[in-house]
Image (cartoon, rainbow, N blue to C red):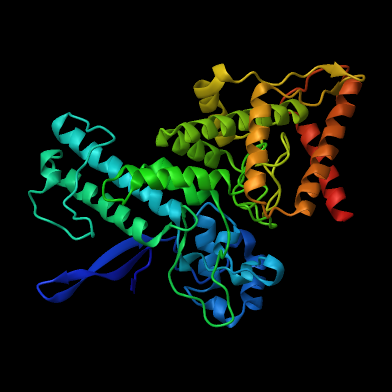
Amino acid sequence: MREGEHAVKLEDEAGVEGGAKTKTTHLLNRYWTSTTYPRPESYKEDLSSHTDAPVSAKLYGGVYANIAAGAESGWDFSSRWIVPGVNNTYHLTDIETSNILPVELNAYLYRMERNLARLHELQATAALPPLAFVATNLKEGGKEGGVAAAAAGVLSVPKAIEYSLAADRRAVAMDKYMWDSKGGMWVDHVVRPPPAGRAAPGKGVVSASNFIPLWAGLTANPLVKEGGVKAARAVEALKGSGLVQVAGCLTTARATEEQWDGPNAWPPLQQLMIEGLERTGLPEGVQLAEAIAKAWLESNFLGWTNSGYMHEKYNGMVPGARGEGGEYYPQVGFGWTNGVVLHLLKTYGDKWTGVKRTKEGGGVPAVVQTTAAGAAVAAAGAVAATNHTPSVDAPVVELNEKNNNKKKKIVQEEMEEEGKAEVEVAMPERLERIVEATKEEEGGQ
């Protein structure tokens, strides 16, 4: 193994050629920074994490670098990056982001390399290869074959072939180092095994990222062994993972105080999961994609009708409730939430019956009236719960429900005062009241 910064080269014995053992070098990527200072926006907190960190946690680039890498990953922060403590507690003092080769990062890069191959071919020939193009100079074991191999018959531009080969090498590496044949999903690869007495970062965490290769189309690559079988197994694994719940797909099935863990559900991940399931073409995958889409639309709609806002993240176990946790107060708006909803409405709008909201009890918003869509998703969640007991802790769910009920009460009081059956959007005064109420509640706990 040879470690660079963003790239890590892994070597394995590919076989015997001419009486001598041959080695194949694989390359996978990770999140990495070289900073040796606390983040300016969280200086005090990072300084404390560094001071309290055990000696072993200061490896793999150092605490500051691993915190910054976790922030740059977009998953800031998650149990995926952290060594679990007693009773599965997680603290940034034990973060090892750069000791992990993440599934979703390499899936993104795989699809990017495939896209660049197509675009270079288009630029030079004005012909765009289909998504399912086969262009590889690689043999099954990952070793390069002749220059005039299969790629030349499909792609004619050297730069396009170069990116196609990079994608094929990555597909072989992900298949070898990330596919978990026992679990039926892809898993993050730990670069360096932990020292004695210390667990590996992210140990035992089931994450939505484990299924992003379906979105990237990895199983369609002919160099991935039994790709069709792996796609089917991944769909079944997702159904039984505990991630699919009544209000969407959880980020991880592990409840922590970090915002990129359960029970939070993030809009971009919903779209990636839905598109990946659709892309399998399997009836079970398509059905599960539709169930997640309908659950997400109903939860977003309920949240908007009850609060007047679109949130950056939601509680995947409580329809309409916003997500919690992390280093800042949850934001409203919200760009990617709106974008995902618009995309899903365009894709599934004709299949979604929606929720109704009526003025009852002096202007109090009605509870969601369960639709066929909601019932289908609830059933899917029940099946998942039967197959796998999610590790989302009850206190976390209760806290989210309590906070959400507090906000509902504020909105209901205002509606009664105004005599209106619907909530007006983007009222700063309302947001301030909700912020103050939540802070008071948190301070009293």
Q: Quadrant where the N terminus lies?
A: bottom left
| Foreground of the two, 34 or 261 | 261
Is 173 situated left or right of 303 in this image? left
- Along the viewing direction, whichever of 356 and 32 lies nearer the viewer: 356
Q: Residue at x 22, y 51 (%)?
A: 165
x 53%, y 62%: residue: 68
| Above or below 429: residue 104 | below
Which residue lies at the image location 57% right of the left edge and 55% below the top edge?
Answer: 206
Identify whether 262 is placed above or below 7. above
In the picture shown, does residue 32 fall above or below 61?
above
- Residue 207 pos. (x, y %): 55, 52
Residue 76 falls in which quadrant of the image? bottom right
Instruction: Count all numbered tags in the image, as a single digit.
Output: 0
Q: Position of residue 36 (x, y in %)?
A: 50, 72
Q: Residue at x 77, y 28 (%)?
A: 306
User: Relative to 391, is 365 on the left or the right?
Assistant: right
Q: Position of residue 341 (x, y in %)?
A: 57, 28
> Is residue 33 shown left or right of residue 38?
left
Quarter occupied by residue 67: bottom right
Q: Is residue 319 visible?
A: yes
| Quadrant where the image shows the C terminus | bottom right
Residue 436 in sight: no
Q: Quadrant of residue 267?
A: top right
- In the rendered structure, the answer to whether residue 48 lies left or right of residue 437 reads left
Q: Position of residue 116 (x, y in %)?
A: 27, 42
